[in-house]
Structure formats: C-alpha cells, structure tokens
Amino acid sequence: MSGKVVVKITWSIKKPLEMAAFAIGTVVAMSDNKYFLTPDIDMITMSDSSNRVQFAFGNKKNGAIAKDELNTAINKLNTHLHDQAEYVNEIANGNATITHSAGFMSTSDIRGLGIKPNAVELVKLKATSNGGMKAQVAKVDGATNYCFLLVTNGVFDITVVNGEIFIPSGTTVRIINTTKRTAYFEGLTPMEIVYVAVLASNATGDNGLSSVAKASTIL
C-alpha cells in the first residue's frame, strides 16, 4: 500500500542560495492563497530568513564569525521550511494539487522523474510602471520550478555549477523562485538597465541557466 502524499523535501542545506530561493518561492505561492490563511511560519518571517541566508552567504569569507552567521542562518531557514512543510501537509491532507499550490513538491509528483528539464531558451522582459519589470519564459517540459535572477550592477556574472548558484561578491541580484513561468520584479530604479536569466529545474536537477536578457526600466 502506498503512503499518504506529503511534502517532498527538495531543498538542501548544502545549497543555501537555492534553499533561500525556494523559500521565496513558497512565500510567493502561499501569499493570498485561500488554502493557507494561517501559516505556521508567516510570510514576513520566511522572507526575512531567506534574505538573511543570502546576505550571510555573500559575507561568508569575512572570517569565522561570518561563517558562524551563515550556518546559523541556514539552519534557521531549514527549520522554518520543515515547519511550514508540516503545516502544508496538515492542510493539504494528501491532496498533491494543494501541496503544489503552496510552492512545495509532493511525494506523488513524478513529473520529470529521472530527467532534467532543458534549459530555458528565451527570457522575455517587459518594463512596467514605477520601476517594475515583468519576466516571462515559455514552458519547459519536465520543469517544476523556475528561478528568475535579476542583476542590476552592470554585468550578469552569476554561474550555476552542479545545481549550485554562485553569486560573485559585489553582484546585486534579486531572486524569485516560483512554480510559475512569469515573475514580477518591483521597486527597481527608473531608467536602469537590468539583466535577467532563468534556471528551470525539477527534483532531478537542471540543465543550466538560460541566455541573459537585457532591458531598461521606465520612469
């Protein structure tokens, strides 16, 4: 007899930036979600915990104290994700669709099992009012998550090696991890050049970043 469908643990403390991006994906998915009105970990706490990991990761080379902070931040976010997963399990009660709507994968989700999705071929950008930028990609067969990375400091120098995202020191990046193929970045500087690439993935892995798209925000 098969077991009850539950959240599948797809994040790893060994890949802190991906875990942070995954956490933001759950925030996007659970915000205003009719199924999850009283989450165990509120959206602000989860976002703050994700940001803490990203900031600590960027400072990890600044001595022992910085490394300790990174480990503390990673473990805290990992705990938050597990607590949230338990909450989602309770609400979903075995319904895989409800689980997916929270930004989590389920143990019954076999899409792309054993096969990495192809890399995203093209990223379309459209500037919106008040410093916004809409990024959209075509559907990638087998992909269950899309990680949008937007850089604003003049050059896109982020790399992905064996599924781990590497962000050079000094690079200013915004990350949106989502099950959707569209992401909206807000609060950007007007008349600013931005660079966006997307990583499509599933539980098996990914096939690398898309090509980098370039666009300017508007006034």
Image (cartoon, rainbow, N blue to C red):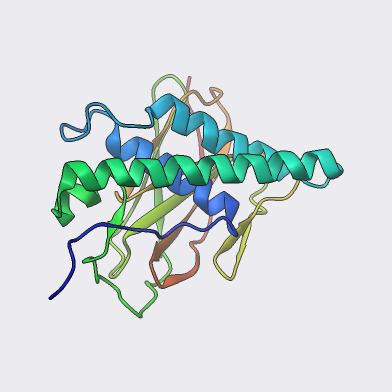
Quick one: 209 or 48, which is closer to the camera?
Answer: 48
- The vertical placement of 213 against 35, above or below, is below
Number of numbered discs overlaid on the protein picture:
0
Q: Which residue is drawn at 47% across and 32% down?
A: 47
Quick one: 140 or 96, which is closer to the camera?
Answer: 96
- The vertical placement of 49 against 143, above or below, is above
Q: Can residue 112 be seen in this view?
A: yes
Q: Outermost residue toward the front? A: 1
Is residue 64 toward the left or the right of residue 153 in the image? right
Is residue 207 toward the left or the right of residue 73 in the image? left
Residue 152 location, quadrant: top right
Q: Residue at x 31, y 76 (%)?
A: 113
The quarter of the picture where the N terminus appears is bottom left
Q: Outermost residue toward the right? A: 63
Q: Percent position (x, y) of residue 41? A: 38, 31
- The vertical placement of 196 against 116, above or below, is above
Q: Percent position (x, y) of residue 204? A: 41, 73
Q: Which residue is drawn at 37% across and 27% down?
A: 42
Is residue 91 toward the left or the right of residue 69 in the image? left
Q: Percent position (x, y) of residue 148? A: 46, 48
Is residue 90 toward the left or the right of residue 124 in the image? left
Q: Is residue 154 visible?
A: no
Quick one: 159 or 128, which is closer to the camera?
Answer: 159
Q: Percent position (x, y) of residue 218? A: 47, 25
